[in-house]
Image: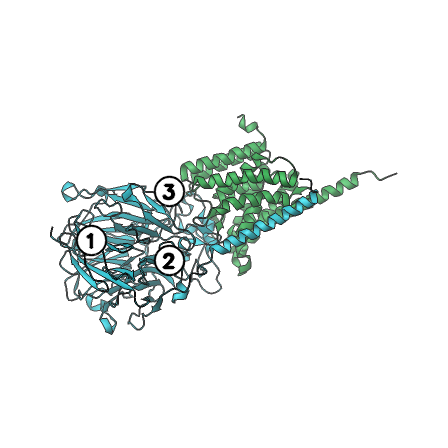
Chain colours: A green, B cyan
Amino acid sequence: MKLLKSSPPWLFASLLTTIIVVGELTHDILGGFDRLALALGTSIVAEHVVSRLFAGRKGNTLSAYITGNSILVLTKPAAGLLWPFVMGPILAIVSKAALRYRGQHIWNPTNLSFAVLLLVAPGSMSILSHQWGNDWRLVVLLLGLGFLVVGKSGLMHVSGTYALAFSALAVVRAWMLGLPVLAELAPITGPMYMLFMFFMITDPRTIVRGKHGRVIVVLIIALVEMGIRLLDQVNWPLLDPLLTAPPIFALFLVGPIAKVLELRRQARAEVEAVPAPA
Amino acid sequence: MSASPALRQSLARLLFVALVALSWGLDGRRLTVESPGAGAPPFTLREVSGPLGLGFRHERASFDEKLAHIEAQIAALGAAVAVTDADADGLPDLYVTTSAFDRPNALFLNRGAQGFVDGAGPAGLADVNREGLGVSMGSVWADMDNDGDEDCFLYRYGYPSLYRNDGELVFTDVTRDSGLEHWVNANCALWFDADEDGLVDLFVAGYFPERFDLWNLETTRVMQDSFEFSNNGGSNRLYRNLGDGRFEEITEAAGLTSNRWTMGAAAADFDGDGHVDLYLANDYGAEEFHRNLGAGPDEGGPRFELVDAGLGDDSKSGMCVALGEVRNEGRMSVFVTNISERGYLFQGNNLRHDYLAEGAGFLNVAEGIVADCGWAWGAQFGDLDNDGWQDLFVANGFVTGDEGEGSYWYGMSKVGGAAGGLVEDAANWPPMWGKDLSGSERSRVLHNRGGRRFDDVAEAVGVTDRYDGRAVAMADLSGRGALDVIVANQRGPLLVYRAEPPPGQHWVQFELTGTVSNRSAIGAAVELKAGALHGLRVVDGGSGFSAQNGRRLHFGLGTQATLDEVIVHWPSGRRQVLHDLEVDRVHAITEPAS
C-alpha cells in the first residue's frame, strides 16, 4: 500500500518492473540479459550525459529507467542485432533536448524513438514484443495492475478513455468493413497496448493539462489510429509502414501538435494576463 | 557547458539528425545481400526442369467452407519432393506431390541421358489425392524391409499410406495391415532406426490436430492457441518397425509425446554417443532436441529425453531442419528456417553449431543474411561449387497474393499478439482472400566463403524465380559429380537448378549399403579428411521441409586431389575406416559384418 501512495514516476517504474519480472519468469520475454544491460545501461548513461551537455543539469535516473525498460520490452530486433537496444534509448533521450518548443519537449521520448526507428530502420527492428505467449492470464494481471497504477496516479481518465475509444472504434470498424469484431478488438489485449496505454499516453511531461483536454486529445489519438488502420483498405504503399504500429504513429502525430497548441495558448494567456502599462 | 540554450538545442538537433541517419545507414548495411568485394561466384545454377522432362505443377488443397476466408494460408503447404531410387537402377528418381483432389503426384524415373519419365501412374503412386483419403503433404522413402528396394511412406492431411516396393516398379498399398492407418494432418515424417535393430522406424509429426477433418469441420477452433507457445497441434508419433510389414506405435514409451505444430525434423547422432537423435522445428514454438538414450529392443524399446541443449526458450516459427557441415571441423550444423518481415516480425533463421559431443549444446551463429531470408521454408546444405565448403540453398515466400490486393501482414498482426483462445478460432481471423503474405520472395543461395561467412549470390548464379518455395532437396541427378537443387514450389512448377562448378574442382561421393544397420544406411555418417578439409555428411531419411535428399553423399574437394581418411559411422555402432580412396568417383561402401 505504501507503494501506491508513491509519486507517479515511481508507480510507473514499479509497474514496468513488474511487467518485466512476470514476463521474464513466465515467458522469457527479454530474449537475453545482454539486451537488458544494453538498454538500461545506455538509457541511464545517455540521460546523464545528454542532461549535462545540453541542459546543464543532472539527469533523472528514474526517467531513464522507465525509458530503457519500455524500449527493452517492446523492441524485437532482427536476429543477432543489438544496436536497436542502444539506439532506441539514445534517440529517445536526445529527442528530449533536441525537439523542444517553448522550453519543453513535445514528444513522448519512447514513442518518438519507436516511430523513428520503424520508419528509418524497418529491416532491423519491429515492435512486436519478444514473446508473451498470448497468455490471457498475464494480460488480465497486467491490465489490472496497470489500471490500478494509473488510477492511483490520477490518470485513469487517460488510459480509460483510450481503452473505451479504441474498443468502440474497433466495433465501428468491424461493422464498416464486415470484419470479425474480435479481430479488431484483439490488438488491445497485446503487450504493445499495455505499454502504450499505461506509459506513453500518460506521460506527464508530454500530455496536455486538464482532464477535458486530455480526454479530447486521447479521443483524437484513437481516431487518428483508426484512420491509420483504415489505410489497410487502400493501396498506398508509401503509408504502409504506419500499419506496423498504428497507436505508436497516432500518438507520434497527434501528441506534439496537441502539446504545441497548449503551449501557445498558455503563452498567449500569459501575455494577456500582464496588465497593460498605464 | 557555457553555450547558450539556443546553441545547445541546435547541437542537440544535429546530434538527433545524425543518430537518425546512422540508424538508416545501419539498417541499409544489414540488408546488403551480396558482400562488396567478394567477387563473382565461381559457379552458376541453371534451371533445367524443362530439358529434363520434369514438368510438374503443384496445386493447393481446398478445405471446408468455414475456413475459406483464410484458406490461402491454411492450404499453403504440400509442395514436397523426395529423392529416391524407386526402380533400383542406381539413378536417383524424384517423387513429387500435389495437394488438390484428383490431381496426380508424379514419380519421375531417371532415364539418364534421356531425362525423366513419369512412372507414377503404372506404379500406383499417382492417383493418391482423393476425397475421404486426403491430400498429399509429402513422402519419405526407405528400404523398410531390407529387401533391396525403396518403399514409400506418403503423409497427408488425411490418412497416410505405406507403399511396399515389390520390385519392377510394383508398389503395393500395405497401409491397412501396417498399423499406420490413422488420420493425421502431417507436414513432416522421417525414417530412422530409433531402436537400432537394423530396421528403419518411422516418425510422423502432426500439424493440425488429428481430430480435425479439414474438409468436414464442426468447429472453427482449429488454429494454434498461441503464436508463441502453442501446444494444441497434432500429435507426434513414433512407430517401431516390427519387420513383417507391421508397425507398433511406441510414442509414449519412447518419451516423444508432443502436441506442438511440428513442421520439420531431422535425425542424426548429434552427441556422438552412437545413437541417432531427433531434432524438431516447431511452428509457434521453440525447437526441440530429443536425445536418444539408446535403450535397444531388448531393453524395452528406444527412450528419448527432451534436452534443452542450448536451444533456449525462443519462440519461433520453425519450418525446416537441414543438416550440414559448414566449417570443415567435422562438426554438424543445423539450419532451421523462420520468418522475417520488415517492420512486423523478426524471428530469424537459426544456424546452430553442434557442441554436444563436448558436453555443451548448440550454438546459434546466424545473423545478417543467414538469419533473414524473408519467410523461409525448405533449405538444404550442399557444396554447389565443389570448393570443399557446404553452401546453403533456402526457398522463400509464403503466399503470393493477387495483384493490387495488398498485404495480409497488418491483418495477421492484429491477432498475432492477442491473448488466449482468440487466435484459436479461425472465425476471429481477418479475411485474407487475395492478399499477399510474404509472397514472391526470391530464394537465397548462400555461398560459403571458407567457413567464415555466407554471401547471398542467388541472382548472380541465376536463381531469380519468385515462386513460393517449399521443399528443397539435393542430389546429383546425372552423375556429373555436381549437385542439382530440386525445388518444389507451392502453386508453382517443380524447378531443378543444376550446379555448374568451375572446372578442375575435385569431388567424391559415397553410396552406402547397410548390412547390420538398415539397408538404406539412413542415419549413417561419413566423415572425410582431406588436407585441410574435414567434412561430415549424414544419410537422410527425411529432412528440410517435406523433403528428402539423395541417399548418395556428395563431398566437394576443391583442388584437393587425394583423400587422407574416410570414416563411416554406421547406425549399428560400427566404425569403418577407409584409406587410399580415389577422388572424382562414386564409392559404393557396404557395411562390414564385424
**First-in-chain label (2 vs 3):** 3
- Residue A73 is situated, as x and y percent measured from the top left of the image, at 48, 41
* Left or right: residue B286 compared with residue A36: left
Residue at far top of view: A2
Q: What is the chain letter for disc 1?
A: B
Foreground label between 1 and 3: 1
Q: Which residue is mark 3?
A: B313
Residues behind callouts 2 and 1 on a single chain:
yes
**Mark 2: which secondary structure?**
strand
What number is the disc on residue B568? 1
In the rendered structure, the answer to whether residue B260 lies left or right of residue B272 reads right
**Viewer-closest of B443 and B35:** B35
Q: CA distance from mark 2 to mark 1?
A: 27 Å
Q: Is residue B64 visible from the viewing direction of this image? A: no
Whether residues under marks 1 and 3 lie with C-beta atoms below 8 angstroms apart, the answer is no
What is the three-letter code of the residue carrying label 2? Arg
Mark 3 chain: B
- The mark lying in front, picked from 2 and 1, is 2
- Specify the label residue B388 is tagged with: none
Q: Position of residue B52 (x, y in %)?
A: 28, 71
Residue flagged by tag 1: what amino acid is it? Val
Q: Position of residue A46 (x, y in %)?
A: 57, 40
Name the image quarter holding residue B456. Answer: bottom left
Quarter of the figure with residue B360: top left
Looking at the rendered structure, the secondary structure element under dot 1 is: strand
Decide which of B221, B167 is in the foreground and name it: B167
Instruction: Compute the Cα span from label 2 to label 3.
Output: 31 Å
Q: Say whether mark 3 and mark 1 are on the same chain.
A: yes
Marked residue nearer the N-terminal end (1 or 3): 3
User: Is there a contact, CB below 8 Å, between mark 2 and mark 1?
Assistant: no
Residues under labels 1 and 3: Cα distance?
A: 35 Å
> Which residue is tagged 2?
B449
